[in-house]
Every structure is written in C-alpha cells, then in structure tokens.
Image (cartoon, grey):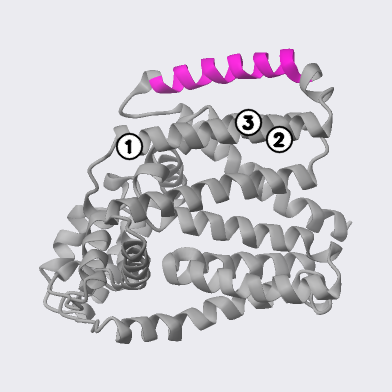
Amino acid sequence: MGQMIRTRFLPLILAGCLAVGVVANLVSVQAPLIGVLIAVMSVLVWAVIRLVRPFIERLTPRKVSVLIGAALVVTVVIQCLVLIYMPVTVYHDPYRVLSQADQMAAGHYTWNITYFWRYPNNVPLAWMLSWAIRCGWLVGLTTNGVLHVLSLLFLDGLIVLTLRTVRQVHARNTAVVGLLALFTLTPFAYTYFLQVFYSDLPALLCLVVIVRTFLFWPKWTLRHRLINGVLLLLVTLFGQITRPNLIIIIPALVVVALVVGVSRWRGHHLMWPSLMVAAGIALSFPATAGIQRLSNFQNNNTYALPTTSWVMMGLNPGSRGKYSGHDVGREINLPSKAARQRYALKTIQQRITRLGPIGWSSIGSLRWAFC
C-alpha cells in the first residue's frame, strides 16, 4: 500500500499542476474571450487528432524520420527568413546583458550601470556572451549575427533533443508527430525564443538534458554512466551559472528522495545523477565568483536587492506574482541592502497573512495564465 502511494504521488502532483495551468489559461482577466477561443481551438485540435491518428500510427519508423527531417528543414528556412526580415527591438534585461557583453567583447571591462549591481545574476551571462561575440567577430560575424547563431543552436537543439527523447520513450507515432506539430506549426520556433537571445533558452535546453539523463540512467552501461555523469555535472553547472533559479531542482530532488524513502535512496538508480546535479549547482557558486573577478565586477550593496525581494514580488497580487516595479521602486528608496531585507521580510509576512491559502492558489493560477 505504501509503495502504491509513493508511486502515484509524483504523477498526482504533476496532474494537479497541469490542471491549474489549464484552468488558468482559460481564465484571462484582460481578455475574457481568449479563454473561449483556446477552448474552441483545443476541441478542434482534438477532433483533428482523432481523424488523423490511424493514418499516423500506420507510418513506418523510416517515414516518421523523413517527416521529422523535412519539417525541421522547413522550420530552419522559415527561422532564417524571420531573422532576416522580421528583426525585433530588444529591451530591458536582454538589452542590458547584450549591451554589456558587446562592450566587454571590445575590451572595456567597466560596470558603470546600476542594473548589474541590482541583478548580479546576469554578470556570468554577459561575460559568456561577450566571448561568443568575440569569437564571432573573428570569423566575420556581426554582433547580431552571433545572437542569431546562438538562438538557432539553442532553440533547434532544444527541439531536436526533445523530439528524440519522446521518440525513445514513447512507442506511439502520434506523440512524436503531435510534438513536432507543436514545435513547427505554432509561434514557439519563430518568435521570442528565436528573436531575443536570453537565459531562458539555455536553461530549457539544460533541463531537457537533465531529464534525459534521469530517464535513461538505469539503461546505460557503466561507461555511458561515467560519460553522461560528467556531462550532467557540466550542463547543470552551465545552467545554474546562466539561470540561477535552476537551483529549484534541489528541493525537487529532496521531495523525490522523501517519496522513494531515505533508506532506499542509497543505491537507488536516481542517487548518482542527483549527486551530479547537486555537485554542478554547488560548483556554480565559486564559478560565478570567479567569473565576476575575471569581469572586473564588484558587488555594490548600496544598490543590491536581497533574495527575499523575489519572494515578496511572488506574493504581490497586484503584479500577479510576477516582477513588480512598484515593489522594486520602494526598495530602491531604502538606504541599504539590510534595510531592503528587513522591508522584504516584513512585507512577506503581511502578504502571507493577508492572502491565505486561497490567495496563494489564485496568484499561482494567474502566473500560469500570464507567463
């Protein structure tokens, strides 16, 4: 009985999160008709899938491979046309990172901007991007050309790796073809992730690599485990440096360990990849400090925001739990990081008390709807 509960626990959590996401996307405060449109389109897509499913399931593996290859080639062609004829204006975080990276690539390691003192988590991203730009210049690429190449590599790498993973674990053709349609027939491959290079895309690709490693670890030989274990550590290190909130994997692994059982965790097939992930995240802290020194960056607590400020913004119903310019504006007016920390803690306590469990759920739903 206990084993059955443990087996069903994680799928139930996933189902609950997906249910929240579905409901939240059907309820739009700013545009109520969007929910109706999504519901109608979902029914139509479901009907089309029912009609074409028998045909798709009869396809041989070779034909599925040809279909995937042809769709990806067409996708890349469209992506190149989008990058050439539909450029976008980059602003705020991506612009700040790009501007600093371009400056560093030219050899100017100065940080005369308060943005990075408030958000030092983006210093490693700017540093790594500066080296990518510098390498691109060596082969005749412009700064924008380097960004386009990076976007194509990370985005199409994410698509290919995800398709490969689903094809390896799922026997039905409809799962792979459906995912292929999602990637190639929707704006996913042609809009934000393609046109604006930022930390989101590398983080997603790293997550796919991490999930793949956990999925296939029990099937690998010792040699493959050694190779992929080192790769997992490096990918986690890169992901955490690029996007520090990847650290949420740690509490997720703790939950899995508790569900499996502490006594059974030692020797469990998930133990070693979990340790590699933990090691990668642990190494990210000295690596980030090293990158800051190489970049000639120094933290300035006069402008720095405490980590608790993000928790405070996450509990702000006015901003639907997202970034709140109002909260940041009030923190900026405080004289020190310690004062901002005290203000954030006090505000967190007040919001938790005021919101209650229903309020927390409401904010969570709104985040799903608007993110």
**Residue name at image x 37 percent, y 85 percent:** 289
Q: Is residue 349 visible?
A: no
When the figure is inspected, residue 178 is found, relative to residue 268, above or below; the finding is above
Magenta region includes residue 48: yes
Per the model, the C-alpha gap separating discs 1 and 2 is 30 Å
Taking depth in this image into account, of 31 and 244 the one nearest to the observer is 244
Name the residue carrying label 1: 84
When the figure is inspected, residue 215 is found, relative to residue 66, above or below; the finding is below
- Of the 4 image quadrants, the one containing the C terminus is top left
Per the model, the C-alpha gap separating discs 2 and 3 is 14 Å
Per the model, the C-alpha gap separating discs 1 and 3 is 22 Å
Within-10-Å neighbours for mark 2: few <14, some 14–19, many 20+: many
Which mark is first along the chain, 3 or 2? 3
Quadrant of residue 72 in the image? top right
Magenta region includes residue 231: no
Q: Secondary structure at mark 2?
A: helix
Please count the marks in the image: 3
Magenta range: 34-53
Left or right of 53, for residue 193: left
**Residue name at image x 81 percent, y 79 percent:** 266
Quadrant of residue 119 in the image? bottom left
Amino acid identity at mark 3 = Ala
> Mark 1–mark 3 contact, CB under 8 Å?
no
Name the residue carrying label 2: 176
Residue 294 image position (x, y, % from top left)? 32, 85
Amino acid identity at mark 1 = Ile
Q: Is residue 33 visible?
A: yes
Amino acid identity at mark 2 = Val
Name the residue carrying label 3: 70
